[in-house]
Structure formats: structure tokens, C-alpha cells
Image (spheres, rainbow, N blue to C red):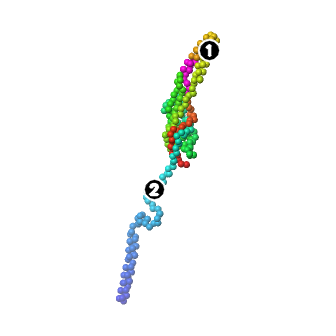
Amino acid sequence: MKRLTILACSLALTSACSGMPAAQGANTLASRPASTSAEATVGKPAGTPVATSGATATPADPVAPAYREVTLPSGTVLPVDLETAVGSDTSRVEQPVSGRLRRAVSVGGAEALPAGTIVSGHVTAAQRPGKVKGRGMVAMRFTQIDPPGAGRTAMSTATISRLAPATKKADAVKIGAPAAAGAVIGGIIGGKGGAGKGAIIGGAGGTGYVLATRGKDVRLAKGSDLAVKLTAPLTLRVPLR
């Protein structure tokens, strides 16, 4: 009987000892704090996205347009339609003038300047004809070009000038016609002597008229065709097509 009692106590003690670690382990797991976000990422497969607070995606920078440089050689002629009317009697030195390319200009088969490209410059001379001598004259020069997308570019061009037509023949007619008319009238009135006096009087009147009037002015209207010649090479940035 005593042995049975001892055996029962031993079994109870063994059972109590074997169940204690499991209970303690359960209590330990229950008391541990939740894993941090850093710990949560440990062991995840590579490439798994991880959420971050406040992070924003940065867009890719836009691709800049590609350009290449082309050079128009000295002597190239630009076909220009005048946009500013000028004249020996209406313009003044340094007055701005502008024009547009009448058609595209190409280099090596590639279009360097499209039609409509703006060129600008100024009047370099404006001279009215005199009453006794001289002819009306106006001149201009273009110094800048504004190709699309590249901004204004300086250029060097030859001066373009226009001179009024000479009036010597017209002046001779203005003097000679009154002289002839005077001679006819004088001859009728006073014979040969009267004809000579009439010619002198008529000629003097015609000469006086010529001396009192100016020669012709010269004008270039808007839309006039000009040939603008480069006097130095012109390098331009042209977008690749």
C-alpha cells in the first residue's frame, strides 16, 4: 500500500513538471509585442514592394530635342519679301525694316530655313533728289534672322539700295518744248527776229520750271521682292527630323 502511494505521488510530480514549460512558452509568446515593420520585411522575397510614408514617384525628365548645326556659306542669296515700305521721301536712317523668306532655303538637301522666316534690319540711307541735280535714293541692310525654335541670330548682309531714274531727258523736254512753242509764237508775231526772242523766252520759262521742281523719289512698297546676299557665313541650329 505504501509503495502504491509513493508511485502515485511520483507520477503526479512528473506530470506537473512536464506541463510547466509548455504553459510558460505560451505565456511568453502571448506577452511579446507585435513585430515592427522592419522585422516584418525580413525574409520576404526580393523585389517585394515595401510601402513607405510620404514617398512620391519622380517622373522622368523630358527628352530635349536634338539639333545639328548647318552653315550657309558667304554669298548665299536669301529670297525676301519686304514687310516694311521704304522710300527716299518717307524713310529715315536707322528706321527698322523687316521681311520674310519667300521660300525655304536648303543646304546639302536639308532645309535650313523654312519659308516665312523673319529677317530684320534698318535703313542705312534715305536721300531726296535736289531741285537742280541729284536723284532720290534709299538703302537698307538686314542684320538679324529669326529661325523657328533657335531665337534671333546675327547675320551680315550686303546693303540693298534703290536709285530713282534719271530725269535729264524729261528735263530737256520740259525746257525744249516751251522754247519751241515760244519760237513759233514769236515767228508769227515778229518774223525771224521774233522767233529767236520767243525761243529764248520760252526756254527760260522751261528752265525755271525745271529748277523749281525736284526729281523723282524712289519707293519700295510692302511685298517688294529683294535678294539679300550674305557677306559672311551664317551658322544655324536646325532640329533633327
- Residue 111 covered by magenta stretch: no
Establish if 128 lies above or below 34.
above
Q: Residue 224: which quarter of the image?
A: top right
* Mark 1, residue position: 183
Q: Mark 1: which amino acid? A: Ala
Q: Residue at x 53, y 25 (%)?
A: 134
Work out whether residue 157 can be spotted.
Answer: yes
* Mark 2, residue position: 56
Q: Is 51 or 214 nearer to us in this picture?
A: 214
Establish if 181 lies above or below 83.
above
Which residues are the magenta region? 205-217
State the image coordinates of residue 90 (x, y, percent, origin top left): 52, 29
Query: Mark 2 or mark 1, which has the lower sequence index?
Result: 2
Marks 2/1: CA–CA distance: 104 Å
Q: Residue at x 56, y 42 (%)?
A: 105
- Tag 2–tag 1 contact (CB < 8 Å): no
Q: Mark 2: which amino acid? A: Thr
Q: Residue at x 55, y 31 (%)?
A: 162
